[in-house]
Image (cartoon, rainbow, N blue to C red):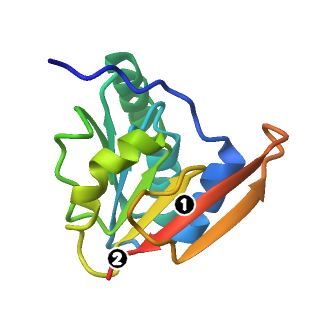
Amino acid sequence: VGRRLIPFVPSPKDVVEKMLDIASPAPDELLVDLGSGDGRIVLSASRKYKCWSIGIEKNPRLVELTRRKILSMGLDRVTVIRGDLYNYDFTNADVVTLYLLPDVLKKLYPKFVKMKKDARIVSHDYGVPGLIPAEIYEVNSIETGKRHKIYLYILR
């Protein structure tokens, strides 16, 4: 039986910038955003860091929106895949970004631990159950007027 849709709640743009600054993907690295929504993370990563970026999103409307943005921005190192983040193999990624609830993160844990050495996971607001963060950052978002946490994990 299918899983319920994870709601689209976008990370504020200033939080996205901080997440990407923390991840600091190199041009030869692959960033995967699980539950990419409107594509703001993969688009920013590709534009600012020139890295390869893949968004995984189940909602067809958001996938189409992101694809239109990719075309209009003329980006060639970013793509979005319509798919279920539970089924997508992201273990070859150098960076995984996400803004997902703890129960979802817990279900993804078996895949996280299969990621390559020194891969980074950057999680907005929620820690990954079972993983110990290398660092926890706090960001005061001008956009939301709220304080957000960003968890950095470095796989060993």
Mark 1 lies on residue? 48
Kind of residue at badge 1: Lys
Rendered residue at 49%/26% (across/down)? 8
Residue 56, image quadrant: top left
Q: Earlier in the sequence, mark 1 or mark 2?
A: 1
Q: Residue 34: in sight, yes or no? A: no
Report the front residue among 154 and 70: 154
Taking 72 as reference, is 30 above or below it?
below
Residue 155, numbered circle: 2
The residue mark sitting in front, 1 or 2, is: 2
Query: At which x and y percent is residue 120?
Result: 40, 70
Query: At which x and y percent is residue 34?
Result: 36, 44
Q: SS class of the residue under badge 2? A: loop
Residue 31, image quadrant: bottom left
Query: At which x and y percent is residue 104?
Result: 37, 41
Taking 34 as reference, is 135 above or below it?
below
Report the front residue among 92 and 68: 92
Taking 72 as reference, is 134 above or below it?
below
Query: At which x and y percent is residue 26?
Result: 42, 74
Report the front residue among 44 and 144: 144
Rendered residue at 67%/44% (across/down)? 13
On the rendered structure, is 141 left or right of 115? right
- Quarter of the image with the N terminus in it: top left
Kind of residue at badge 2: Leu
Taking 71 as reference, is 27 above or below it?
below
